Image (cartoon, rainbow, N blue to C red):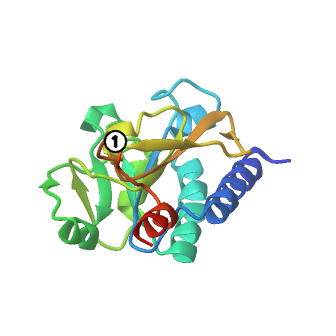
């Protein structure tokens, strides 16, 4: 099988698992960190490919269309892991725009491709996402809400890159009397 077709199939498999997880809701922010160098089997930051980014972008766009999530594409360390989002997302989440245009060597191929192909892209410094995917160990944790829960998908790679998926949950607060689920709360009040 052609390598690009394998990348497409790997991303499709992960998208299918995301859809089945029940953790993606319309309007949720989904952060994507991606090293296309790692996907191609090279060390992060050494062999970026907008051609691979295009395949991933297409599959992520399909996932977005199926779920109603909004996607934030994380840039590489040379842009301090800033994010490419639609201007509407920036406005809705009261995010602060920063001045930078991602290019493959400063921002990464995935963020660069996203910037060129989104409707009205802007770059923001930070976001608090509900969930995300890290393709090639790019470290998306700084952009997830505080309580991240890893998801153990069957598909663990895209091309040659390891993939980690995570969702978030609200903080559990209170002491030993605290109740965290509706059934227990209803039983106590009856």
* Corner quadrant of residue 180: bottom left
Where residue 69 appears, as percent x and y from the top left, is 45, 69
Q: Residue furthest top?
A: 43
Q: Residue at x 31, y 41 (%)?
A: 175
Badge 1 local density, few (<14 within 10 Å), some, or many (20+)?
Answer: many
Q: Is residue 171 left or right of residue 139?
A: left
What element does badge 1 sit on?
Answer: loop
User: Is 20 situated above or below 33?
Assistant: below
Q: Is residue 184 left or right of residue 87?
A: right
* Corner quadrant of residue 147: top left
Where residue 131 appears, as percent x and y from the top left, is 45, 53
The residue that mark 1 highlights is 107
Q: Residue at x 61, y 59 (%)?
A: 18
* Corner quadrant of residue 12: bottom right
Q: Is residue 83 left or right of residue 42?
A: left
Where residue 127 appears, as percent x and y from the top left, is 27, 52
Q: Residue furthest right?
A: 1
Q: Is residue 172 left or right of residue 94?
A: right
Q: Residue at x 54, y 34 (%)?
A: 136
97 or 108: nearer the viewer: 97
Q: Residue furthest front?
A: 190
């Amino acid at each position: 099988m052609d390598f690009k077709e394998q990348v497409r199939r790997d991303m499709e498999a992960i998208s299918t698992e995301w859809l089945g997880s029940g953790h993606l809701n319309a309007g949720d922010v989904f952060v994507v960190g991606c090293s296309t160098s790692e996907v191609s089997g090279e060390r992060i930051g050494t062999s970026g490919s907008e051609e691979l980014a295009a395949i991933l972008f297409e599959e992520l766009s399909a996932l977005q269309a199926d779920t109603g999530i909004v996607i934030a594409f994380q840039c590489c360390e040379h842009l301090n892991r800033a994010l490419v989002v639609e201007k509407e997302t920036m406005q809705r989440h009261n995010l602060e725009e920063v001045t930078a245009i991602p290019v493959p060597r400063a921002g990464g191929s995935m963020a660069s491709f996203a910037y060129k192909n989104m409707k009205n892209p802007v770059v923001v410094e930070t976001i608090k996402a509900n969930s995300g995917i890290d393709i090639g160990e790019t470290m998306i944790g700084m952009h997830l809400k505080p309580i991240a829960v890893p998801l153990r998908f069957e598909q663990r790679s895209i091309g040659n890159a390891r993939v980690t998926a995570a969702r978030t949950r609200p903080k559990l607060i209170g002491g030993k009397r605290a109740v965290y689920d509706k059934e227990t709360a209803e039983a106590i009040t009856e």
